[in-house]
Amino acid sequence: MADLHGVIPPLLTPLHADGSIDVESIHRLVAHLTEAGVHGLFPLGSTGEAAQLTNTQRRQVLEAVIEANQGKLPILAGIIASSTASAIEYAEEAHQLGVDAVVATAPYYYTYSQPEIIAHFRQLHAAVDIPIVAYNIPSMVKMNLDQKTINTLAQEGTIIALKDTSGDVSATRGIMLACEGIEGFHIFSGLEWVSDIALEIGADGLVPGIGNIAPADYVAIYDAIQNGDLETARHHQRRMIELFNICYHGHSQASYSAGALGGFKTAMQLLGIFETRQMAAPMTTIPDENVAPIREILEKLDLLPIEA
Amino acid sequence: MADLHGVIPPLLTPLHADGSIDVESIHRLVAHLTEAGVHGLFPLGSTGEAAQLTNTQRRQVLEAVIEANQGKLPILAGIIASSTASAIEYAEEAHQLGVDAVVATAPYYYTYSQPEIIAHFRQLHAAVDIPIVAYNIPSMVKMNLDQKTINTLAQEGTIIALKDTSGDVSATRGIMLACEGIEGFHIFSGLEWVSDIALEIGADGLVPGIGNIAPADYVAIYDAIQNGDLETARHHQRRMIELFNICYHGHSQASYSAGALGGFKTAMQLLGIFETRQMAAPMTTIPDENVAPIREILEKLDLLPIEA
Amino acid sequence: MADLHGVIPPLLTPLHADGSIDVESIHRLVAHLTEAGVHGLFPLGSTGEAAQLTNTQRRQVLEAVIEANQGKLPILAGIIASSTASAIEYAEEAHQLGVDAVVATAPYYYTYSQPEIIAHFRQLHAAVDIPIVAYNIPSMVKMNLDQKTINTLAQEGTIIALKDTSGDVSATRGIMLACEGIEGFHIFSGLEWVSDIALEIGADGLVPGIGNIAPADYVAIYDAIQNGDLETARHHQRRMIELFNICYHGHSQASYSAGALGGFKTAMQLLGIFETRQMAAPMTTIPDENVAPIREILEKLDLLPIEA
Amino acid sequence: MADLHGVIPPLLTPLHADGSIDVESIHRLVAHLTEAGVHGLFPLGSTGEAAQLTNTQRRQVLEAVIEANQGKLPILAGIIASSTASAIEYAEEAHQLGVDAVVATAPYYYTYSQPEIIAHFRQLHAAVDIPIVAYNIPSMVKMNLDQKTINTLAQEGTIIALKDTSGDVSATRGIMLACEGIEGFHIFSGLEWVSDIALEIGADGLVPGIGNIAPADYVAIYDAIQNGDLETARHHQRRMIELFNICYHGHSQASYSAGALGGFKTAMQLLGIFETRQMAAPMTTIPDENVAPIREILEKLDLLPIEA
């Protein structure tokens, strides 16, 4: 994990119409991403609906991703758990299955103080012998991981990286500067609209949900920034912002999350990678009549296979 | 469950110093509550730190409460799960263990729409043959159960009761009026400072966390309101508001929740009912130097045993 | 102001169709309230759209209310100002016009600390020789007046009363208990759905916006609680909760506030007291097609004049 | 206003110890900024404590800035008003005094719908013949100006520019793309830590509060980005992030705003530009013992005059 970098998409979790895990589609997804040149795989994140899966389903997803990957890319397993005890259980299992690292949120039912969040990561680190990436996503977890919290955990070696989806690029930059001297500490951005910028100001990589659909564009952004070719990076970034319009065609009664993740899954179905666009309960699946506008967006961006 | 009513405390979860479930203290707790005349037992709620326990620990708590209860009081098991699938698993297990009902929150990692929350309760109801109480606690879950949502679920028989801990008594009253004609639907209040009021305006019962410590006071409030004796109700209610001061002696680095639940557990230890005041990770346990002010409050309210 | 008590409605501000102050309607409003037996008049509160009026318009409202009142009832002028300096200017003007007290919010553009909020009230008190009522309305002002802040200001005599519209009845009760021993300190509730309860647990009076329309019902609630007649209080309280349904017929593009205050104004127009239902900019006025459901609610509650 | 661009700092408002406007310090401030090469002056913004000044004081500030400027730079006057009516009054006055444009927030006491916010800007535009810049600052105003709102107002010519201080660079970028084809529409960023980035992705200019202290650094960032010299831009940007540490030395009882603006004023006093560091009520002024760490930061960045 010493050179963790690049595009590490948070994998969507394809489901059969009955809600069970669709292992074949996972294999197609891993192939799709690997062929595009991504640098790692991150199953069981927020994009992967991890919080909506049972423990059995989580395990099935990890096993399928590991089998499909055949040891090619580093695998980072999401640990979205409402308690320290569950986080340890999930991480231990992921470790035994053989993933390379875990990406763990703060616990999220109660509201915790920053020292309690630090305690959470320390206990996870003490309990399981696996590298930990801290996952900051206050829109879901209610609490932000403060700069001082990240700095403390990074300095002492409890975490090897941060995945920041706080939405506040100024804060991410502050963390980058504060952690600059820390050997082997990496910062990843989960913001899909400012990936080019995040890389420019020093991020080591990207965790773009929409990268499930268009991984080649995100790899192109990453490569372009490494080569100082801002124009190419801007071109692909703009395509991705346009692609994001697939997120606004959810069921009229659905939450924003169901519309966004549902738009992603619908695109994957149109690409022929997923068999269905089924969401895990209780999220509402995109209705038939809302598929056409998503297809149009993909067509406009030349993302559909020729015969589709 | 047709005549669900009265004082149904959300049970604290006593732990050994190593964090494991303290079954003997659970037995003493159940005896303490039963002797005071409470009308039901509600393990695995927010007060019971359910979100911080492993699945194994949850099961141990339920088994201990069921064994200690010996079939005397109705048992309502908390279902605090971040997904519909997990909620169904937990409810199925609780059902097989033999509890009388479950008290379920909305799922709480993502932000859901009200129709999705309705879908969650309907799927839980379809999957497990057990009465469901809806548990409204937006401070933890992020989303409120709207009046229309409650009304829909109550009308169709998906839920038999509501436990409202929204903090907005006006809203609770609106729900009471809106659900007035629904046969067999019950409303419980989780607000410890206005229990007398909630009962006066029509609540069927109370779910007071601080009732772990002073169940007799809450039973007295309930009985007094039934008898139209407002003065007695006010007297005990005031005692309880004063008792609430035990919540403000947490560790200086702890969250409010850790201080409040920690204050409860410290009181239980001082009463000789709990062996320790240990909190589940990552909450901070009350330090030794903060015990004295909690003892003083208990003494002032004559809640400590004579020899203490 | 030593015996401030009872029903003190926050007066709506009637406007002509061109947005100018409708002085004649103010006279009819004051007569309507006085005849119903209210105990005071509170112009320029949130219900009065004070924050949407110019300084000139505020003055016109005060002058009209003072003239209409003819010295009969105490007048409390709202001071909704985003700064201490403006609050002092408004209070000085109100004092010179001859009102009996002012009802002042915290300043509300920046987010202030509690000590800064205390400083605000102290400076207002030092600058203008008029009794001050603190107005707690965090939904508008962003900040809550904490129990300790209220207690400090009450103890030292900076404020003579609190008008609490925080929505948290538990917190109001905590303030009541904390301020119990303070000579001459009064607490008023701004919550229209739990007026009976607020009075039962010790409030000195009510500030109900919907009392513009049905002041006699609120006076009946107040009198009934004084006489220990809970049944009568409950009856009128229920009518008022039902009346509140006039708040849900705003323009489809309007904010909640515009719908609620617009519903109030529409009712006043239907009662023949206001000439128009015009809102101050930028709030949207209730469209013609939304008047009928409001009329129905008034009719059902027998609030319309016989010939209407 | 057709070529509005560059660094337009929001001017601090220097006060005498008695809280009155310090006109001489305003003259020194305008000279300091002009000499550094800024492209415009923006008095009466949030940084200028506009919401804490009386109408008379606002006018004094504008007059002093206009006099000091001698027609050299465009002046944009802040219009921070809680109502449409007051915004029109302030804008009319600013127009008569001769400023070049106004920078107006949404009204901010009530919570408004987006159509009501659109109505606010349209009424302001219809009433006063002066170019309007929309000022998006949801942390103060509670409401965000949505992309569609900005787009509508820009398309129809109601506003000529946006000053975005929403903190969400992704959203700013979305607005930039959505408004790309609109002739003469400009976007300014109020985010001091990502100024270089904002310019890179298409912002026309910057409105940095901390630019009061170090205007030359922000001008250097602007020039470097124009010249494609990212390295120089990064260098100055990093200095500015470091300079931001002056914001964390407020009085222990003060709000964050009082600490940040107080830190700015303390720096200006140390630079010999402001006579005092006095804050307007009710913000707490920085105490003497907190000046030293601010001086150290300035020294480390070589911002103090040689003899200081």
Image (cartoon, coloured by chain):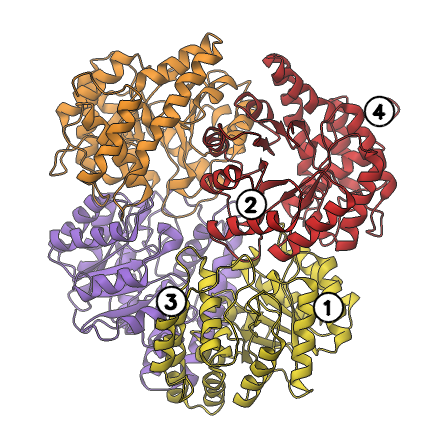
Chain colours: A purple, B orange, C red, D yellow
Q: Is C131 placed above or below B2 here?
A: below
Q: Which residue is mark 1?
A: D91
Q: Which residue is mark 2?
A: C139
Amino acid type, residue under disc 4 in the picture: Pro
Secondary-structure class at tag 2? helix
Give the CA separation, mark 4 to mark 1. 45 Å
Residue at left offset 57%, top offset 27% = C203
Residue B188 is left or right of residue D128, and the answer is left
Q: Is B270 placed above or below D254 here?
A: above
Secondary-structure class at tag 4? loop
The mark lying in front, picked from 2 and 3, is 3
Q: Which residue is mark 4?
A: C305
> Residue A281, which numbered label?
none
Q: Earlier in the sequence, mark 4 or mark 2?
A: 2
Amino acid type, residue under disc 1 in the picture: Ala
Q: Which residue is mark 3?
A: D290
CB atoms of marks 1 and 2 within 8 Å: no
Amino acid type, residue under disc 2 in the picture: Ser
Rendering quarter of residue A95: bottom left
Check if mark 4 and mark 1 are on a common chain.
no
Secondary-structure class at tag 1? helix
The mark lying in front, picked from 4 and 2, is 2
The mark lying in front, picked from 4 and 1, is 1
Q: Position of residue B139 (x, y in %)?
A: 41, 40
For the C terminus of chain C, which image quadrant? top right
Badge 2: chain ID: C
Give the CA separation, mark 2 to mark 3. 34 Å
Q: Position of residue C300 (x, y in %)?
A: 74, 23
- Foreground residue, D39 or D33? D33
Give the CA separation, mark 4 to mark 2. 35 Å
